[in-house]
Image (spheres, grey):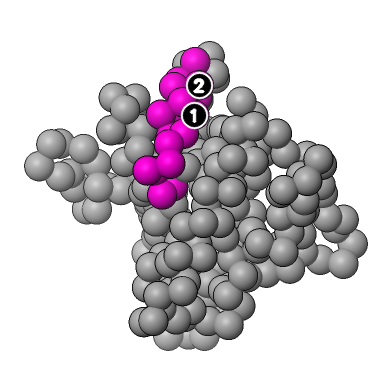
Amino acid sequence: TLAQKTDAQGKLLLQAKSRRNIYMALSGCLKYGVRQHYIAVNPLEAVKPPRKEAPKDDIDAVLVEGRTVMNAVQSNDNPDEARWLLAFLGLRRGERLGLPWRNVRGLEGDEPKLVIDQQLAWDKGPGLHVKAWPKNRKPRTIPLSEPWVTALRRQRERWVEMTSQPDFEFRKPEYADLIFVRPNGNVITLNDDNDDWSALLTSLDITPWRAHLTRHV
């Protein structure tokens, strides 16, 4: 039934990926019930799983629209300037949101760079947390040029001002050095980042495309 539900504009409430994820999770629960003899048969065996759909990406359009996005966010008044520009520097979503200030090196020098060695991740058990890379995965270094240097300098000024407020407090100690945090001391979640990205593109009259594509622009 959920697969057919729409909002007021007629848009499906659940996309193909979400419907498939729900199906697989429910099927796993029912299979467990059969194995434990709680139920005699898995009723989902009579229902075909939602088809797995490959993303439909218009790379040519992204190449053009990406420049529009970069130009639009470059402003001292845009609090998300650095967050979106870093998306065009090859960082994955979790790497951007989990980037600490200690890994921004030489911002005032001649060879500024980023060191990527951790990410914000969601894992069963700890939930949302800062996750260090496995020992066998080497950190990577990204040289910085403009407009990223200026954007990060501006972000540092905003960050210092925000975190110095009397009522500001980080929700978790592990968030204390992260570049991107909310005024309430929490991190920007992975889902919120997706929603913010879609809202940004919509505000620019651009049909939303996956933020992950910016890594390849």
Residue at 82%, 42% in the rendered image: 111
Q: Amino acid at mark 1?
A: Met
Numbered badge on residue 67: 2
The image quarter in which residue 166 lies? bottom left
Instruction: Work out whether residue 204 can be spotted.
Output: yes
Residue at x-position 46% and y-position 26%: 71
Range of magenta residues: 64-80
Q: Residue 70 bears which disc, if any? A: 1
Residue 39 in which image quadrant: bottom left
In the image, what residue type sits under mark 2? Arg
187 left or right of 199? right
Residue 128, given in percent of the width and then of the height, sits at 53, 72
Marks 1 and 2 in Cβ contact (< 8 Å): yes
The residue positioned 21% from the left and 38% from the top of the image is 11
Crowding near pointer 1: few (<14 within 10 Å), some, many (20+)? some
Residue 80 spot, x, y in % from top left: 44, 47
Query: What is the CA distance from the residue labelled 1 to the residue labelled 2?
Result: 5 Å
